[in-house]
């Protein structure tokens, strides 16, 4: 009898299906897959860096076997978060410069620069992050105090948006800038005929030309520092809005060597050298790098009054801002890029810049389909111009700009024009998708601040109590899509990332709480507990 039972057990065992061996199984998860149905899953299996099954724990453990099994403990999991517009490389470089974010006065700026130079002596002092709109005296500073502190050391301090620069006399002398220097596409600010040290937009390139080039080791460290900061926030893909060939090739080499894990969608900077090389070469695509777009600057920024407006600024009589790239140059560039496989991704803040870009896009894309050209920022739109957004012309916006700018945006634009600003829901309704990013280091790296600004439309001080221009709030589902699948779509990458689905890269983020259910005021406190890229753990909260 025992022998019969033994053989029956053997037969039953032999009839059981053989489980497929995979690299990682995740169970007991509260996973938002962000698939077409926005469905949830409690388990998934990963092999060779990709999702091979998504479903229930019973089903997954029945069909698959892995030596590495992660019990998520009920934690919320999202697809790997994507920042659709940032300055990844610049974030890394900035770690080695003076941090001026949050300065409360010009005196605060000066003290930070002085303390930094005492601790880290530099031959050319650089910094970034000041914003005169945060000061009691909301005016551009003057270089006189910098000249007194640093008469022999050049200093260049970028405004938080990167569209204005404060420099001292030594830097001006190195660049050959005088009160008679002519410029276009920006401004060399003077007072009573004398240089103030403030440069807005295009003239800033004269200073950039004399800043010492970072060493290769500095560049590598900058990229690694930037990756560390991003994966700590749950980001798995970053869209870097403006890179030169040399930096792109360095990123590629580090990725290929396994020294850089994060995925990079690289917009090439609009230079002759970059255009001649990449438009001729065609799309460059690896598992971690995607080079298929050109970043163009239409105008400047609203905070520095460089954004191009149709009628004058409400707080500066007769001032319209300026186009950085002239209208005819945008039109000819659009025609050239349209003849290639590349996207055109244009920075447009003011209503005048936006209509220039929209018209140029529509003209060259009229007979084409699925080009997905992007307007980066799409910040101030005239009511009639929203109709020009479409599946072919996608808005790529940064929600925290709304909650940073709301204190002074109406001063710049007036009560009527500001209604067409930061209009995320309206843009989504017209285009069908919207890509969300931060524009870091202009804003904080945190995607949770992005989520809060988009879905709640308040700043971190819970202001305003009722939310800012709530007719354009996004739902939590729309916001998460904007940071995952819609961002991937804007990159032509929706078949490989942006959702937890079979066949896609196993990029996912484990959160400290349920981003879809947590009380609104707790969203900014969310953290990435773990970040995975291609099924590999790249960050874990200690």
Image (tube, rainbow, N blue to C red):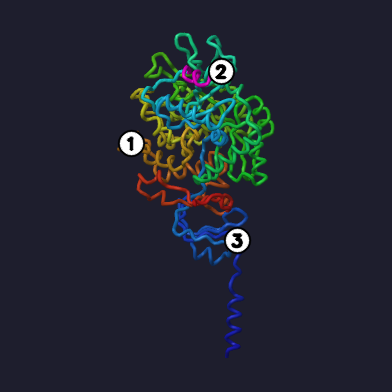
Give the CA separation, mark 1 to mark 2.
42 Å
Q: Position of residue 22 (x, y in %)?
A: 60, 61
Q: Quadrant of the N terminus?
A: bottom right
The nearer-to-camera label among 1 and 2 is 2
| Residue 163 visible in the picture | yes
Q: Quadrant of residue 317?
A: top left
Position of residue 244 in the picture relative to residue 306 (left or right): right
- Could you say which is closer to the camera, residue 242 or residue 139? 139
Whether residues under marks 3 and 2 lie with C-beta atoms below 8 angstroms apart, the answer is: no
Give the percent coordinates (x, y) of residue 53. Answer: 55, 58
Q: Nearer the viewer, residue 86 or 435?
A: 86
Q: Position of residue 226 (x, y in %)?
A: 55, 39
Residue located beneath label 3 in the image: 22
User: How many C-alpha atoms fall within 10 Å of the one at disc 3: few (<14), some, or many (≥20)?
Assistant: some
Residue at 65% across, 40% down: 252
**Place of residue 401 in the rendered image (x, y in percent of width and height, measured from the top left):** 43, 32
Disc 1 versus disc 3: distance between alpha carbons?
Answer: 48 Å
State which tag comes first along the sequence, 3 or 2.
3
Looking at the image, is 529 positioned above or below residue 140? below
Residue 239 part of the magenta segment:
no
The residue to which callout 1 is attached is 463
Which residues make up the magenta segment? Answer: 143-151
Is there any visible trace of residue 369 in the rendered image? no
């Amino acid at each position: 009898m025992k022998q019969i039972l033994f053989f029956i057990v053997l037969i039953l065992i032999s009839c059981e299906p053989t489980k497929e061996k995979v690299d990682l199984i995740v169970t007991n998860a509260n996973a938002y897959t962000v698939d077409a149905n926005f469905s949830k899953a409690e388990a998934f299996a990963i092999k060779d860096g990709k999702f091979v099954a998504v479903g229930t724990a019973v089903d997954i453990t029945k069909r698959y076997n892995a030596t590495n099994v992660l019990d998520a403990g009920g934690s919320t999991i999202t697809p790997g978060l994507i920042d659709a517009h940032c300055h990844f490389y610049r974030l890394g470089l900035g770690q080695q410069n003076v941090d001026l974010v949050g300065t409360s006065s010009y005196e605060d700026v000066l003290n930070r620069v002085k303390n930094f130079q005492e601790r880290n002596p530099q031959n050319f002092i650089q910094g970034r992050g000041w914003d005169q709109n945060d000061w009691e005296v909301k005016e551009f500073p003057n270089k006189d105090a910098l000249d007194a502190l640093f008469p022999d050391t050049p200093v260049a301090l970028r405004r938080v948006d990167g569209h204005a620069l404060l420099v001292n006399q030594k830097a001006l002398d190195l660049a050959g800038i005088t009160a008679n220097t002519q410029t276009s596409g920006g401004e060399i600010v003077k007072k009573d005929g004398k240089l103030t040290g403030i440069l807005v937009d295009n003239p800033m390139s004269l200073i950039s030309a004399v800043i010492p080039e970072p060493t290769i080791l500095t560049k590598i460290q900058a990229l690694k520092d930037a990756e560390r900061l991003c994966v700590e926030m749950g980001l798995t893909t970053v869209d870097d809005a403006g890179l030169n060939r040399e930096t792109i090739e360095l990123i590629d080499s580090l990725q290929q060597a396994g020294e850089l894990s994060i995925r990079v969608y690289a917009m090439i900077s609009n230079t002759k050298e970059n255009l001649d090389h990449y438009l001729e070469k065609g799309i460059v695509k690896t598992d971690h790098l995607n080079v298929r777009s050109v970043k163009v600057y239409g105008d400047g920024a609203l905070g520095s009054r460089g954004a191009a407006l149709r009628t004058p600024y409400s707080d500066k009589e007769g001032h319209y801002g300026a186009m950085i790239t002239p209208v005819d140059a945008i039109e000819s560039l659009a025609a050239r890029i349209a003849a290639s496989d590349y996207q055109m991704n244009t920075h447009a803040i003011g209503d005048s810049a936006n209509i220039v870009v929209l018209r140029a896009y529509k003209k060259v894309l009229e007979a084409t389909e699925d080009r997905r050209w992007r307007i980066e920022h799409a910040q101030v739109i005239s009511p009639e111009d929203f109709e020009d957004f479409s599946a072919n012309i996608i808005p790529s916006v940064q929600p925290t700009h709304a909650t940073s700018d709301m204190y002074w945006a109406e001063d710049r634009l007036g009560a009527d024009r500001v209604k067409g600003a930061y209009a995320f829901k309206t843009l989504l309704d017209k285009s069908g998708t919207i890509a969300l990013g931060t524009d870091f280091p202009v804003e904080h790296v945190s995607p949770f601040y992005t989520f809060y600004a988009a879905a709640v439309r308040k700043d971190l001080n819970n202001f305003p109590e009722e939310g800012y221009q709530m007719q354009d709030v996004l739902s939590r589902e729309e916001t998460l899509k904007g940071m995952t699948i819609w961002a991937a779509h804007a990159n032509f990458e929706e078949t490989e990332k942006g959702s937890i689905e079979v066949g896609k890269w196993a990029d996912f983020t484990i959160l400290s709480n349920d981003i879809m259910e947590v009380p609104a005021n707790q969203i900014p406190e969310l953290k990435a507990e773990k970040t995975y890229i291609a099924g590999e753990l790249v960050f874990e909260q200690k």
